[in-house]
Image: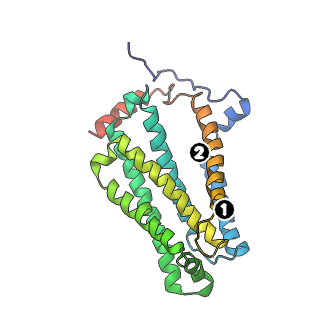
Amino acid sequence: MAKNFVSNKDETVRMFRNNFLESLSHIHFTVPLFIFVPVIIYCLYQAIVVFNLGLLVIFGFIIIVGECLAAMCLMVIVETVLSREEPFSLWLKPKEVHDHGKLMLTFIMLHAYFSFSQLLIIWAGNLPMEIRFYLRRLEHGWGYVGLFLVLFHFSVPFALLLSRPLKRNPYRLVKLAGWLLFARFVDLFWYIQPTWQESFTWGWGYLVDIIVPVAIGGLWLAYFFHHLRQRPLLPAYDMHAREFLDYAGVAHD
């Protein structure tokens, strides 16, 4: 008999054993946004005033959209791995994967739009305080890193995601998602490192820039997958879950 992962019960499943963590799980999804946005604004203030990088007009939007792209790529990777087993093997079909590929394409275009808009506004203004941000990142070897980002963070992924068969193939899409996560790391490296190092020359010191994100990311992934195993992958007690999934499947046919 096939397993029934969606119940008709009207009660909610407990996500955490700890009462404090369980209470946090019931917080409305907009609350973290009210915390996240001020943090980004504070980091922007630090970049402008403390590190004297100049007035980066839409820097906060670039970072937020980049993080949305990274989150979408991580979701594609996780769901593809989980699709090998039930219940995801029953629900994750090409039409759902197609939607996720379109969202990746959307965030890639939005990130490129914000990045080019910032470059265009600052370059057209030609003010010394702002223009030096890009002058430092387009000279002394850093321009090659910027060219890498133009090609492999935007142009190539954009061209690949225009393909409908690729967006509907989870095993091809997951490879592109993994590459985009690497490209996001290079993008952040290009934003941060020139502040402390004028020229881009290879040295063993760059190993720290690789080891630290991998170590912190590894701890986060360990925590993430530990809790992922303890909760249902589908809304197990949602009365309308099966109806919605059936409707979504018909709507995409």
Which residue is at a point 65% across and 76% down the rendered structure image?
53
Which of label 1 and label 2 is nearer to you? 1
Type of the residue with mark 2? Phe
Could you tell me residue 233's position as x and y percent? 50, 30
Horizontal arrangement in the rendering, residue 18 relative to residue 92 (left or right): right
Query: Relative to 165, does residue 85 appear above or below in the rendering?
Result: above
The residue where tag 2 is placed is 29
Most foreground residue, 98 or 169: 169
Type of the residue with mark 1? Gly
Which residue is at a point 55% across and 57% down the rendered structure image?
185
Most foreground residue, 62 or 131: 131
Q: Which numbered disc flags the more N-terminal residue, 1 or 2? A: 2
Q: Which class describes the residues within 10 Å of circle 1: few (<14), some (14-19), or many (20+)? A: few
| Visible residue check, residue 69 | no
Horizontal arrangement in the rendering, residue 19 relative to residue 185 (left or right): right
Q: Farthest residue in the top direction?
A: 1
Query: Relative to 145, does residue 134 appear above or below in the rendering?
Result: below
Instruction: Confirm or deny contact between disc 1 and disc 2 (CB under 8 A).
Output: no
Which residue is at a point 50% across and 74% down the rendered structure image?
143
Horizontal arrangement in the rendering, residue 50 relative to residue 247 (left or right): right
Could you tell me residue 105's position as x and y percent? 39, 55
| Visible residue check, residue 22 | yes
For label 2, the SS is loop
Could you tell me residue 107's position as x and y percent? 44, 57
The residue where tag 1 is placed is 205
Q: Give the mark count.
A: 2
